[in-house]
Image (spheres, rainbow, N blue to C red):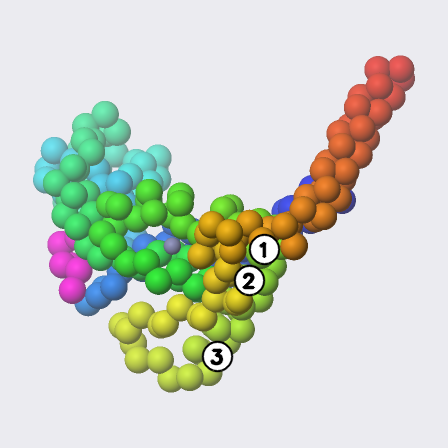
Amino acid sequence: MLKRAKKEELSQVSAVVDEDQRCFLNPEAVSRHLFCSVCQEVFVEPQRAPCGHSFCKQCILQWLKKANTCPDDRKLLKKSDLHHDFILENIIGDHMVACPFRKLGCQYVGQLQTSASHKKECLFNPANMPDFLKKEALKNSVQASEESTSRNTEEGVLPEPPQPSLKMRLFAAGGKQRQLLCAMFGENKNDTEQRDQTSVEENINNSKKRKKTT
Ligand SMILES: [Zn+2]
Ligand SMILES: [Zn+2]
Ligand SMILES: [Zn+2]
């Protein structure tokens, strides 16, 4: 039961937010030389071939499963010829992106190369939220995305993050306000969860015992 609930929760989050998505502030301004010819997206972990062409790591590895040539000029190419293209990666890393949790209310914008460390600490990252806030934040973001699609949003303009709920704002304020909030909504929930968790463990142990006896 618990496992299924957790799974559902995770799929809900990933339906709303793609954590790995890079939301460039100004996608039009990204040089066309930074796009992979295989997937037509801005390179992810670019790898350079001896012929000088670069591709996303996943793109070129997939390609080389079926071919032994460079996708661009058909020169012979094998996996061991590839080198991590640091220069391209750094140039891409300088571009400004929004936090992938913007849909949940995060205002953060910064260079792509620093966004990974922000993501880990981001208060709008469901992994950093107490359970009682997760559901609310998701509901909030679904509402906001429905509203923004019904409005005519200009292309290339980053949509405003939704106004965080009062609870979320208290949580983000930190200190005493967060303590109070968690004391009001968090503790009981944690207790029941712990109880659920132990009963799950008991079940697992019991089923193990049963397996041993059979
Ligand atoms: Zn690619
Ligand atoms: Zn090539
Ligand atoms: Zn964030």
Q: Are marks 1 and 3 in contact (CB under 8 Å)?
A: no
Q: Nearer the viewer, residue 168 or 68?
A: 168
Quadrant of the rendered structure where residue 101 is?
bottom left
Q: Are marks 2 and 3 in contact (CB under 8 Å)?
A: no
Give the image quadrant in which the ligand numbered 3 is located. bottom left
User: What secondary structure is marked by label 3?
Assistant: helix
Q: Residues within 10 Å of mark 2 (few under 14, many from 20)?
A: some
Q: Are marks 2 and 1 in contact (CB under 8 Å)?
A: yes
Q: Which mark is residue 147?
A: 3
Q: CA distance from mark 2 to mark 1?
A: 7 Å
Q: Which residue is mark 2?
A: 167
Q: Mark 2 or mark 3: which is in front?
A: 2
Indicate the amino acid at tag 1.
Leu
User: What secondary structure is marked by label 2?
Assistant: helix
Where is residue 150 shown, x and y percent of the image?
46, 83
Query: Does label 2 or label 1 sit earlier along the sequence?
Result: 2
Q: Which mark is residue 181?
A: 1
Q: Residue at x 16, y 37 (%)?
A: 86
Q: What span is colored magenta in the figure?
A: 29-38
Q: Mark 2 or mark 1: which is in front?
A: 1
Q: Nearer the viewer, residue 84 or 106?
A: 106
Judge whether residue 36 is colored magenta. yes
Where is residue 179 shown, x and y percent of the image?
55, 49
Q: Residue at x 55, y 62 (%)?
A: 167
Indicate the amino acid at tag 2.
Lys
Majority secondary structure in the magenta region: loop
